[in-house]
Image: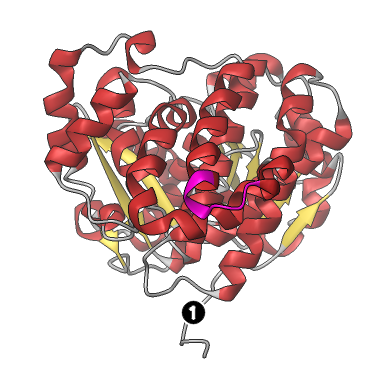
């Protein structure tokens, strides 16, 4: 019997090479006269946003740009972006870039319109709205933020905090594979592993809203990501591989937006918050060790996923053995892709682990979704295994 569930996603999705350059056509119902574009300095240095901006200006829109977004964006940066949008009289918000730019854009669209206190919006379902029309354009294949109702920023020195609400789902998500051509190998690898983690954790989530739609999307996402991540890393202008990665990332985003992620993300967030390790790499560093911890209760579930990414593992009959091999092969894949594979490779020492474990316990909204209950001592052992 199929239990009750809800499934939310972005209102409209466009997947098209060159779509960003004709954004004025795709987004006409949402833009208004004064769109506000949120991006980061890396995008500006590459000029990736220029065709989009030119199209908007040619269509008669008065455009303003906020381009200060950094990885793990801090609260102060979000506040500056909101004030800039208000000063512009923004009629819509366009997030253009990686997950950080899209996450900031979501909060700008929400707070600039509603005027609500961000401190009262943290958590699940606390945002009130309304928000400005929102268009999200990812330039990496990883976060799936263009189809998730989640925005994560850094509060204080290290703590990651999130707003989770259907209000943050955009009116339009634009997937333009051309924007990802030539993305550096390490970024492609880390964001690709991030998307795979979304699919894996969504599929195995203990959430009461784990549902057949999310599981189907997670499987298709893993199929696309597993088959194309090496091509995308080592042949960075392969259009087919880039398109498959972008689509896989989006499908994984749809899956975990409704069947939420768990302990891999909970243990990854302190690594990013404290040591400023990119989010995808933080996930990759702990992924195999969390899976091995979970195998005590979730081996059968992971055994279903293993052949989707590594088809030869279908020949392994034992669920337990196949699940263990799945974790090991994912660790090996990270190494093949050129990522660091140990915490010590990113400057983390054994003395740092107790604080990481304590900080991971703050991620209660994620830990409740883990297939196996995980406490602070367990987190410490997982970090030790990853060191």
**According to the image, label 1 marks what residue?**
6
Position in image of residue 8 (x %, y %): 54, 71
Q: Quadrant of the C terminus?
A: top left
Pick the front one: 148 or 288: 288
Residue nearest the viewer, comparing 367 with 385:
385
52 displayed left or right of 324: right
Q: Quadrant of residue 18?
A: top right
Viewer can see residue 36: no
| Residue reaching furthest to the front | 317
Residue 89, horizontal then vertical, whole percent: 49, 49
Can you say whether 343 is above or below 281 in the image?
above
Task: Give the left or right position of residue 236, taking residue 65 as reference.
Answer: right
> Farthest residue toward the bottom?
1
Q: How is the image coloured?
A: secondary structure
Q: Secondary structure at mark 1?
A: loop
Q: Horizontal placement of 368 versus 24: left or right?
A: left
Q: Nearer the viewer, residue 123 or 243?
A: 243
Q: Compared to 76, does 187 lie above or below?
A: above
Q: Over which residues does the magenta segment extend?
A: 316-321
> 240 above or below 204?
above
Across and down, in percent, residue 78 comes to 35, 38
């Amino acid at each position: 019997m199929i239990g009750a569930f809800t499934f939310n996603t972005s209102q409209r999705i466009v997947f098209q090479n060159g779509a960003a350059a004709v954004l004025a056509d795709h987004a006409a119902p949402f833009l208004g006269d004064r769109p506000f574009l949120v991006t980061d300095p890396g995008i500006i240095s590459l000029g990736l946003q220029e065709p989009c901006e030119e199209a908007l200006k040619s269509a008669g829109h008065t455009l303003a740009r906020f381009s200060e977004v950094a990885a793990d964006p801090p609260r102060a940066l979000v506040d500056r972006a909101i004030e800039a949008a208000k000063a512009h009289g923004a009629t819509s918000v366009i997030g253009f870039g990686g997950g950080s730019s899209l996450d900031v854009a979501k909060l700008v669209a929400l707070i600039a319109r509603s005027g609500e206190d961000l401190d009262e919006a943290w958590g699940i379902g606390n945002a009130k709205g309304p928000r400005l029309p929102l268009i999200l354009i990812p330039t990496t294949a990883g976060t799936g933020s263009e189809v998730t109702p989640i925005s994560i920023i850094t509060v204080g020195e290290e703590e990651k905090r999130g707003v989770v609400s259907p209000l943050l789902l955009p009116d339009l998500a634009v997937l333009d594979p051309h924007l990802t051509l030539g993305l550096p190998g390490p970024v492609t690898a880390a964001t690709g592993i991030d998307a795979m983690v979304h699919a894996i954790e969504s599929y195995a989530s203990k959430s009461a809203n784990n549902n057949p739609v999310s599981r189907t999307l997670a499987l298709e996402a893993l199929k696309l990501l597993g088959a194309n991540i090496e091509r995308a890393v080592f042949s960075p202008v392969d259009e087919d591989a880039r398109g498959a990665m972008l689509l896989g990332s989006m499908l994984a985003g749809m899956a975990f937006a409704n069947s939420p992620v768990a302990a891999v993300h909970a243990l990854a967030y302190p690594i990013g918050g404290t040591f400023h390790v990119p989010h995808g790499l933080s996930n990759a560093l702990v992924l195999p060790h969390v899976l091995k911890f979970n195998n005590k209760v979730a081996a059968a579930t992971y055994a279903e996923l293993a052949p989707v990414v590594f088809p030869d593992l279908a020949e392994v009959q034992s669920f337990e053995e196949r699940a263990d091999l799945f974790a090991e092969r994912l660790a090996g894949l990270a190494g093949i892709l050129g990522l660091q594979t140990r915490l010590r490779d990113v400057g983390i020492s054994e003395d740092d682990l107790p604080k990481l474990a304590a900080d991971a316990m703050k991620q209660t909204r994620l830990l409740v979704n883990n297939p196996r209950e995980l406490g602070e001592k367990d987190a410490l052992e997982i970090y030790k295994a990853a060191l």
